[in-house]
Amino acid sequence: MNIRLSKDWEAAVRVIEKIEKAGYEAVIVGGAVRDYLLDKEVNDVDVATSAMPDEIKKIFNSTVDIGIAHGTVLVLDEGQPIEVTTYRTEGIYIDFRRPEQVTFVKNLEKDLERRDFTINAMAMTKSGELIDLYGGQQDIQNGLIRSVGDPNTRFREDALRMLRAIRFSAQLGFSIENKTLKAIQQDSDLIEFIAKERIHMELSKMWVSRKVYDGINALIESHLAKYLVGDFEKHLEEWRYFNTTSSEVGWAYLCLLNRNQLSDIIHFYKLSNKEKNFIRNVLNAYQALLNRWDELDYFQYDLFTLEAAYDFAIWQNVKVPFKKEHIAMVKSNLPIQSMNQLAINGNHLMEWTTKKRGPWIKVALDAALLAVLKSHIKNDEEHLKEWFLHEFNDEG
Ligand code: ATP
Ligand code: MG
């Protein structure tokens, strides 16, 4: 087999060689092997090893303890950072969650057995020999997400896996194998035991996946949607054309479709301040779009926000009387792009009047901004002074 030589993969191979030289086993595992077989760009290349974490730290000069309790050491020696994790099983599962405790084991088979899906449970040696104990390669060929072992058992160990099945199916365009899907339908209520941060992470990955509509459909079909906030069934069709490279756009669109549950969504999924700010902006921009954007809208929202609001209209089949390219054009043709490009500021106004400093300054500057944006006044000091003395100075 010829290994496609991504930088990460090459670094992982060098890491493996060093570990082997020290007398231990090491292989590439998980998502990297899956993506390699799918001919997809391989980014994070994870290495699993029979060596214990402290042994790994002895082999390499430069390491970071990023998850020692779980057996993970970040090796920095080889240019690209590579995560090296000691073969392990997971401790006892309590409350349908992944345990904090893990047990290190000596062989790879045990390590692969704890992994969620067959496509994620393969390993590869440094020379490209595939270790596939659960038919992962076949499932990749058939486009199937299948639990390793009995699906009900696996979902009761860690209920997040149910949502991961749906996320991977949306990312890869795969179907969920029948028994696996049935088990999710039976155990869907267990998702309520899972930390919302983990749910947030999976859905964030789903928003930027290729097949979000299929993912939403799978949420409904699997019954998981019942235990999540937001009405997925009612809005299914509005997801049909949804497509983005930004998870924030996904969260904002979920909020838009479920405006009546806005604060529930924000709390349930523990959205970050950054996400909340974006949502507030894009929902305002969307509302403004419905009443037609004016110069101030083009000025105050950044291009990304405007384009997202535009997409929201299109995805919901709301007619917009201009093309998307129009947005960037109008925005770049505004007389000024930011407030500090306005030829005057509060100090100018203070010079031109005997009035005391006060809230009127902001009112006047906003009016000046609008007049400049609408090209009613040229953006230079002379014209703005004339305008100001005429419009503002005679007021009390
Ligand atoms: P990506 O990083 O592209 O989202 P990935 O397959 O690398 O995909 P991760 O969440 O990074 O997914 O997990 C790495 C590997 O760890 C998985 O491929 C899988 O083998 C295993 N894994 C992760 N989460 C679980 C889980 N909840 N239960 C069982 N195994 C898991
Ligand atoms: Mg990963």
Image: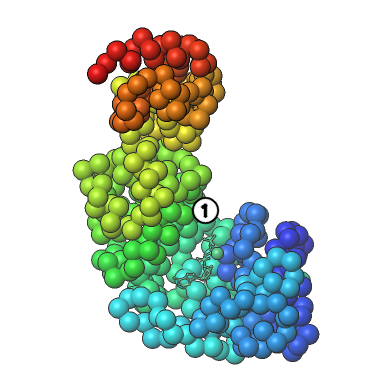
**Height in image: 15 above or below 186?**
below
* Residue 174, horizontal then vertical, whole percent: 48, 54
Residue 135: which quarter of the image? bottom right
Q: Nearer the viewer, residue 95 or 64?
A: 64
Mark 1 neighbour class, 10 Å CA radius: few under 14, some 14 to 19, many 20 or more: some
In which quadrant will I find the N terminus?
bottom right
Q: Residue at x 41, y 50 (%)?
A: 274
Pointer 1: what residue? 172
Q: Residue at x 44, y 85 (%)?
A: 101
Residue 80 visible, this angle: yes
* Residue 222, horizontal then vertical, whole percent: 32, 58
* Residue 158, horizontal then vertical, whole percent: 38, 73
Q: Find the residue positioned furthest to the front.
A: 354
Label 1, secondary structure: give it. Answer: helix
* Residue 104, horizontal then vertical, whole percent: 54, 88
In which quadrant will I find the C terminus?
top left
